[in-house]
Structures are given as C-alpha cells and as structure tokens.
C-alpha cells in the first residue's frame, strides 16, 4: 500500500508542477525520466544498502570529527560559560559553523573545491539536458550557499534569460550550504541529511525541467566562473572565519525572532480558536504529508512541522521535530528529508537580495518570480521526501 501511495505522491507532485509550467510544449521527457530513475536508485542505495550505509557513516564521521575540532575552539573561548553537562544550542550547534566556513575557504583557496564543483557539474549537464552553468550552479549551491554561489557566476548574471535565472535561483533554494550541514547533523539523523542533499540535487533539475523548460543553445552554453580576488592565505582565512561568524549570528537571530513570534501567534490562536497556529497549518499540510508516505494518524502532526519550515526556516522546524517524540521512525525520516533545504519565505528575500547586489535589474526579475521560486523548491522537497519514503 505504501508503494502505491508513494507513486501517487510523485504523480501529484508532477501534476502540480505541470499545472504552473511556463511552457508545457517544450518539456523534454527523456532526461526527466532518466533523472527520476537515478533519484530513485540513489535513494535505494543510500537508505537500503551496506554501501550507502558505509558512505553515509563515513560522511557523518568526517563531520563528527570536524565538529570535535570546532569544539576545541568554542570551549577555549566559552568553556566557563556553559553549565557542566549541558549543551547550549548556540555554542554547540551554531558556533562550529565558523570552523566549517574556514575549512571551505581553505579548499577554495587551494582550488580543490572549484575543480570538484566544475567537473561534477559538467558530468551532471550530460544527464539533465541543461546547460553547463545550471549544472555548475546546482553543485556550487550545495557547497557555497544560496548567496555566495551567485558571486562565483556574476560575470554571466546580466546576460541570462529569465528562464535560466529562475533555474539558478531554484537550485540555490532547493539545496543547503555545506557550512551548516554539521549543524543539521546535530539535530536530525545524518543519514537523512546526506540523502536529502543528494536527492534535492536531482529533484531540483526534475522540477525545473517541468516548471521552467527551455533549450540552451551551443552559443549560450558557456561557463565563466569568477576568480576570487588575489588575497594572501591569512586574509582569505580571516574573511571566511568572519563570514562563518556572521552566518552563526544570523541564524541565531532568526531563531530568536521566529521562535518567539510563532509562540506568540500560537498563544493568540489557542486563546481565540482553541487550536494553535501550527496545529491549524498541520491540517492544511496533512494531505501532502500523507501522499509523502506518512500514516494519516501522524499526518497533521507532521504537516505542522512542514508548515513551520515554510513560514520560518529549517532550523526552527528541526528543533520542533525534536519535540515530537511520539512520531514513528519512518515519519521522522520522511519529515527530516523534507526539512533539509532552504525552501521558505525568507529565502526569497535572501536570494533576490544577493542577485540584486550583483545586478539590480536581474534582482528585480528574481523578486517578481519569488513565490513561484518557493513553490518549485517546495515541490523539490516533497518529491525528495516521497522518494525517500519508498525505502524507509
């Protein structure tokens, strides 16, 4: 029965995406079919095979080791503040972002990351039928982040059509930054974080191929990656450390604001209607949770967590998921995969602001299709969670 529901869920995602497609006549079904098959095989390999278990375990152990190194720096500065035996969220989840950001900077400086991103992107372009720029951007977004990735392709931003610009922005919203993956792994099972990152990469191409189909000519199919300004090693390191600190502080501020606002709205709704705001959203999102493979008896509870992610951010939703201890392991897995992306309302402003900072006219274009961007990225999350649910 669950396989039938999952297939139905995938079909519903395709229908909902097809319904708002920019150009249904130009949808290319061959690369679409190939990517759906690849996404399904990858989900099976990651969740149901010893090879997948080994790869995820290795990936998780690397981050566990990196976080332990980060902890050395955090404890040196804040060791006397934390109470013995307690794990303050800011110190243990957010501040290690600084070390991961510094490590990414080192890999960028030594040209290791650009090499990996470029050639994985070139391989993907052979599979997805899209341009080299789109494929590069999807991989780069998963490593550099939704704002920083546009800096690396700023030479081409002004020359892009609306269709190609949409695909670049959709990739940025559908993935997550490698600098905060370690933080996610401390809130949800690393297995689901890794699975979501891989599935979202292909899911972004699948949804974009339906919602925003177009053909890139050979003349347009070029990739111009912006070289970083020449800096000394320690100038670069200091910059990436400060960038990581800004991300940690920004996430902390967003959490304080969103958690407080949601608590206030829940209180108001409970007082007036006898039901919290999140519970009300849970009923709205429950059908989507059910078609993702979540049992109906848990669909409202899961739907409220999904809605929390969309109206606030994934950090707030992951913390909320940790409070719902009565959910089955399968439901936790499906919801966890859904949560690993930047698909929320605040990302519209972040992405349009990042593009506008590089090219004002194109930034205005992004702002105009912002809601459609969120719609597509949400469909990517639903698709990834549904496919993962087949093997949980």
Image (cartoon, rainbow, N blue to C red):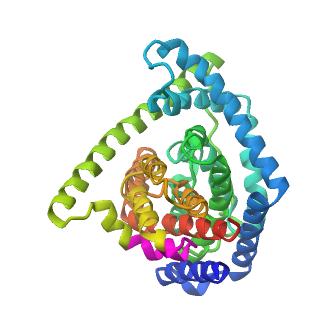
Which quadrant of the view contains residue 229? top right
- Residue sitting at x 49%, y 80%: 16
Q: Nearer the viewer, residue 343 or 338?
A: 338
Taking 88 as reference, is 151 above or below it? below
Where residue 67 appears, x then y in whole percent?
63, 29
- Residue sitting at x 53%, y 68%: 163
On the rendered image, what quadrant is the N terminus found in? bottom right
Residue 149 lies in the magenta-colored region: no
Q: Main secondary structure of the magenta part?
A: helix
Q: Nearer the viewer, residue 27 or 156?
A: 27
Where residue 242 appears, x then y in whole percent?
49, 25
**Tally of numbered tags:** 0
Taking 168 as reference, is 209 above or below it? below
Q: Is residue 223 left or right of residue 55?
A: left
Q: Is residue 115 left or right of residue 305?
A: right
- Residue sitting at x 47%, y 72%: 297
Taking 290 as reference, is 360 above or below it? above
Residue 294 lies in the magenta-colored region: yes
On the rendered image, what quadrant is the C terminus found in? bottom right
Q: Nearer the viewer, residue 224 or 350?
A: 350
Q: Nearer the viewer, residue 73 or 98?
A: 73
What residue range appears in magenta?
A: 284-296
């Amino acid at each position: 029965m669950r396989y039938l529901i999952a297939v139905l869920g995938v079909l519903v995602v395709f229908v909902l995406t097809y319904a708002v497609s920019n150009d249904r006549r130009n949808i290319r079904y061959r690369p679409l079919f190939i990517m759906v098959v690849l996404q399904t095989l990858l989900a099976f390999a990651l969740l149901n095979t010893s090879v997948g278990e080994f790869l995820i375990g290795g990936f998780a152990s690397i981050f566990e080791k990196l976080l332990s190194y980060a902890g050395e720096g955090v404890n040196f500065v804040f060791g006397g503040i934390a109470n013995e035996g307690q794990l303050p969220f800011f110190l243990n989840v957010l501040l290690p972002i600084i070390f991961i950001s510094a490590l990414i900077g080192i890999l960028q400086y030594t040209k290791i990351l650009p090499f990996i991103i470029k050639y994985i992107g070139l391989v993907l372009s052979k599979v997805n039928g899209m341009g080299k720029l789109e494929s590069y951007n999807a991989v780069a977004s998963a490593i550099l982040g939704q704002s920083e990735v546009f800096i690396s392709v700023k030479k081409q931003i002004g020359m892009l059509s609306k269709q190609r610009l949409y695909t670049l922005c959709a990739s940025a919203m559908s993935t997550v930054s490698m600098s905060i993956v370690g933080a996610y792994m401390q809130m949800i099972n690393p297995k689901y974080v890794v699975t979501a990152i891989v599935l979202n990469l292909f899911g972004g191409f699948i949804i974009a191929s339906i919602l925003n189909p177009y053909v890139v000519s050979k003349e347009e199919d070029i990739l111009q990656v912006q070289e970083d300004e020449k800096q000394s090693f320690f100038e670069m390191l200091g910059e990436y450390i400060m960038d990581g600190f800004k991300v940690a502080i920004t996430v902390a501020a967003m959490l304080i604001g969103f958690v407080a606002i949601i608590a206030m709205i829940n209180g108001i709704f409970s007082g007036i209607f006898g039901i919290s705001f999140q519970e009300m959203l849970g009923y709205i999102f429950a059908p989507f949770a059910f078609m993702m493979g979540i049992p109906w008896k848990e669909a409202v509870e899961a739907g409220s967590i999904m809605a929390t992610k969309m109206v606030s951010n994934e950090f707030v939703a992951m913390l909320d998921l940790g409070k719902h201890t009565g959910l089955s392991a399968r439901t936790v897995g499906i919801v966890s995969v859904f949560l690993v992306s930047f698909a929320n309302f605040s990302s519209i402003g972040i992405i349009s602001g990042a593009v506008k900072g590089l090219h004002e006219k194109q930034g205005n274009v992004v702002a105009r299709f912002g809601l459609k961007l969120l719609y597509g990225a949400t469909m990517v999350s639903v698709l990834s969670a549904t496919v993962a649910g087949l093997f949980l």
